[in-house]
Amino acid sequence: MREIQFREALREALSEEMRRDEKVFLMGEEVALYNGAYKVSQGMLDEFGPKRVIDTPIAELGFAGIGVGAAMNGLRPIIEFMTFNFSLVAIDQVINSAAKMMSMSGGNFTVPIVFRGPTGSAGMLSSQHSQAFENWYANCPGLKVVVPSNPADAKGLLKAAIRDNDPVIFMESEQMYGDKGMVPEGEYVMPIGVADIKRPGTDVTIVSFGKMMKIALKAAEELEAEQISAEVIDLRSVRPIDYNMIVESVKKTNRLVIVEESWPLASIASEISFMVQKRAFDHLDAPILRVMGGDVPLPYAPTLIEAYLPNPARVIKAVKEVMYMKA
């Protein structure tokens, strides 16, 4: 094990898979000469050359479509969006081509493609550059949606995504690229669709994913000081969702709080709430609560960003509410 940055873990995954399989290539804005907008692909142009690390124009619809066509013809593209906010101009290719092609072709075409880049808020970037799209893409059959929360998971899951024969949406966070964590030496691949208990507990289950895992774990740490034992589950992927792990945890703790950055309507938290009440209703000792982003376009002002986003205090308040304690 060694400690490396989130961006370095992603780079290792990309590079190892490109060395392993010559059909894998990386394409996107500034991925080559500039070494990546967030330096994820630093040094890769020197190693793999301009035919496999390809700079594109600012034309997401165009290069997403090229990627889909390449995948249908036997290659394994990795398409980097500088931010998933920009994927909106390419969403026709992602949804109507990549996600549906195997079904529409009767299984004659697979689309082994990865669309990756940062999602959600990243500071004072205002409404058009701060949206969380995990639930949007998770709504579409034919896609897998992965949202890692730490460097080790990021590497193992990205390698799995590149090897997958289905299109995978791989969502990161601009604010996590510099995060450090322990990453195993050597080859390892993590299965997509398997959640992880990051912190065992007995009193309440807290479920989250991606950047919001920091909030969930910080809240759990502060709750421990008040003798409240929170079990924290990292979904790691939001399509598929590991419902079984969540349900079994709720059967033990009898309470559930879900932490998510996105807007409340039709969120991942809404889906989990439905499945838990369907499969574990008799085990619930309190209504399920969600700690969500605000139901407004994200503002620019730092004070309003702070009010919009989930934070440990809001999670702690929700936990105490489901435990019928005074906040």
Image (cartoon, rainbow, N blue to C red):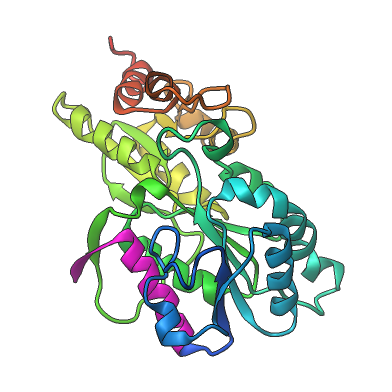
> In the rendered image, which quarter is residue 62 located in?
bottom right
The boundaries of the magenta stretch are: 1-19
Q: Which secondary structure type mostly characterizes the magenta part of the structure?
A: helix
Residue at 61% from the left image edge and 75% from the top image edge: 77
Magenta region includes residue 243: no
Residue at 28% from the left image edge and 9% from the top image edge: 326
Is 216 situated left or right of 20 in this image? left
- Can residue 13 be seen by looking at this rendering? yes
Residue 260: percent from left, percent from top: 47, 35
65 up-or-down from 176: above or below = below
Asked whether 85 or 316 is in front, the reply is 85
> In the rendered image, which quarter is residue 213 located in?
top left
Asked whether 120 or 287 is in front, the reply is 120
281 up-or-down from 113: above or below = above
Residue at the extreme left of the image, as rendered? 225
18 up-or-down from 34: above or below = below
68 up-or-down from 213: above or below = below
